[in-house]
């Protein structure tokens, strides 16, 4: 049967069979189906959606288009934590070492930043010498020995996703929940972990702008994972303001290290208080979220979590001295302070705009292949709803040039305002139990 029948069926709102979906993926990866026909099907999915069974079949077909990593030789329940991303999101850098210190093997494949959101791999590469490229054997061996490894996706994992993502990017079909869910989960399933904890963000600084769509995406991904036999949990987090104070690769790693030393900003602490119990209970260390949080706090206060991070750095050829000497991170030559022109309360009106500041500085990318500057960034000195006096420093900008610093300053000032009345807080973090 020709592929045109599959396009017409979905165009008319029909439900595709598992065979039709698998034939589509196999044909596209092998080069037997042209881009223009796949584009037509993607648009039909975008307009008409898919039910959960179709999404599961699509996800598994994409996952099975390449290698499935076998982590069975690693003792324990292997846990992967995934975030849909946001401005200042350094959660993985903190949560993964803490979980590993609590006895949860964390075998994680991460991605690079695109647009206004940062990527975990870019942040880790701000550590001199750190390698995110390990062979499968090296990856498994490191998790066995240290309990933690974070690497980039291998080229042989879910190749169908890479092809489809590139096409979605140029056909206006990126913001399709079925396509987003299958893209994320195909890579997670192929990576081989036993349990996945999802952090789905929403707000002006996230790809999902409203809470309702974020919950819908989370529920679909939970369904996919459970159909695949995985232990699944999800946390919904707000991204209407940057997480923490630091936005930028090097300075976010520094903030993460400070958190592992027990100095987490209040909002980062609040996220950890929700997400770490989910990771630790998913890993089977305890069934109690309260006990899991106690274990997490003990791992930080005892220094075990910081040691876990140090061990990962050393195992992946990075310089562990950065933990005690932040001057070893890439440094920007220009520092510009942004001051308040009046008194009142700081209101973050456009979180994505603050993320765009880092892109203007050269710390963000438009394509995955683009080289970025790991030293640049922005540090917020006052958070949303914080009291401001005229002349207070609102932010510090780290830049390569005065011109870029001024551009970032202007973009930052467009993204915030100072109100007479204290604005309502917008922090919303909770576990999603469906």
Image: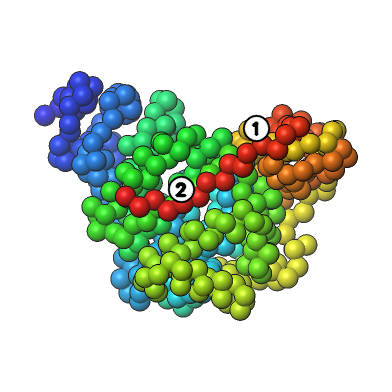
The residue beneath circle 1 is 349
Question: Looking at the image, is 301 positioned above or below residue 208?
Answer: below
Q: Position of residue 18 (x, y in %)?
A: 16, 41
Looking at the figure, which quarter contains the N terminus?
A: top left
Q: Quadrant of residue 128?
A: bottom right
Quick check: can you spot residue 105?
Answer: no
Q: Position of residue 313 (x, y in %)?
A: 59, 69
Quick check: can you spot residue 6?
Answer: yes
The residue beneath circle 2 is 236
Q: In the shown orientation, is residue 401 left or right of residue 181? A: right
Question: Looking at the image, is 38 positioned above or below residue 135?
Answer: above
Kindly identify which numbered label has been placed on residue 124. none
Label 1 vs label 2: CA separation?
20 Å
Q: Quadrant of residue 318?
A: bottom right
Q: How is the image coloured?
A: rainbow
Q: Residue at x 43, y 71 (%)?
A: 104
SS at mark 1 in the image: loop
Residue found at the far right of this picture:
391
* Viewer-nearest residue: 139 or 114: 114
Q: Residue at x 24, y 58 (%)?
A: 229
Mark 2 crowdedness (10 Å alpha carbons): few <14, some 14-19, many ≥20: many
Q: Residue at x 77, y 54 (%)?
A: 331
Residue found at the far front of this picture:
421
Residue found at the far left of this picture:
1
Q: In the shown orientation, is residue 381 left or right of residue 252? A: right
Q: Residue at x 20, y 42 (%)?
A: 53
SS at mark 2 in the image: strand
User: Mark 2 or mark 1, which is nearer the start of the sequence?
Assistant: 2
Q: Position of residue 58 (x, y in %)?
A: 26, 41
């Amino acid at each position: 049967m020709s592929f045109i029948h599959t396009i017409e069926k979905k165009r008319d709102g029909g439900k595709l069979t598992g065979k039709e979906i698998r034939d589509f993926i196999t044909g596209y990866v092998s080069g037997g189906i042209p881009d223009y026909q796949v584009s037509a099907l993607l648009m039909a999915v975008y307009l008409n959606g898919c039910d959960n069974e179709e999404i599961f079949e699509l996800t598994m077909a994409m996952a099975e288009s390449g290698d499935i990593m076998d982590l069975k030789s690693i003792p324990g329940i292997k846990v992967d934590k995934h975030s849909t991303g946001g401005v200042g999101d350094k959660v993985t850098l903190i949560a993964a070492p803490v979980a590993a210190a609590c006895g949860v093997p964390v075998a994680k494949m991460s991605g690079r930043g695109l647009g206004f959101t940062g990527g975990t791999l870019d942040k880790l590469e701000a550590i001199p010498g750190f390698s995110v490229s390990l062979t499968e054997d090296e990856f498994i061996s490191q998790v066995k020995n240290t309990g933690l490894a974070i690497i980039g996706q291998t080229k042989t994992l879910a190749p169908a996703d890479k092809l489809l993502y590139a096409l979605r990017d140029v056909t206006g079909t990126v913001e399709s929940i079925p396509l987003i869910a299958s893209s994320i989960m195909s890579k997670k399933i192929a990576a081989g972990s036993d349990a996945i904890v999802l952090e789905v963000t929403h707000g002006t600084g996230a790809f999902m702008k409203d809470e309702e769509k974020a919950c819908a995406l989370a529920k679909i991904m939970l369904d996919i994972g459970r159909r695949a036999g995985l232990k699944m949990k999800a946390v919904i987090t707000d991204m209407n303001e940057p997480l923490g104070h630091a936005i930028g690769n090097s300075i976010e790693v520094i903030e993460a290290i400070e958190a592992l030393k027990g100095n987490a900003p209040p909002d980062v602490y609040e996220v950890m208080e929700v997400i770490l119990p989910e990771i630790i209970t998913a890993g089977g260390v305890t069934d109690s979220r309260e006990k899991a949080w106690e274990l997490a706090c003990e791992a930080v206060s005892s220094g075990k979590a910081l040691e876990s991070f140090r061990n990962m750095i050393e195992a992946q050829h990075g310089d562990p001295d950065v933990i005690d000497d932040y001057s070893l991170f890439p440094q920007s030559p220009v520092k510009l302070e942004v001051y308040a022109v009046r008194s009142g309360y700081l209101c973050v009106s456009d979180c994505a705009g603050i993320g765009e500041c880092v892109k203007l500085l050269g710390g963000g990318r438009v394509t995955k292949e683009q080289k970025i500057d790991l030293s640049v960034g922005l540090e917020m000195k006052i958070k949303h709803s914080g009291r401001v006096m005229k002349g207070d420093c609102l932010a510090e900008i780290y830049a390569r040039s005065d011109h870029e610093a001024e551009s970032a300053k202007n973009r930052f000032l467009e993204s915030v305002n100072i109100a007479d009345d204290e604005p309502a807080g917008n922090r919303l973090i909770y576990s999603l139990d469906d």
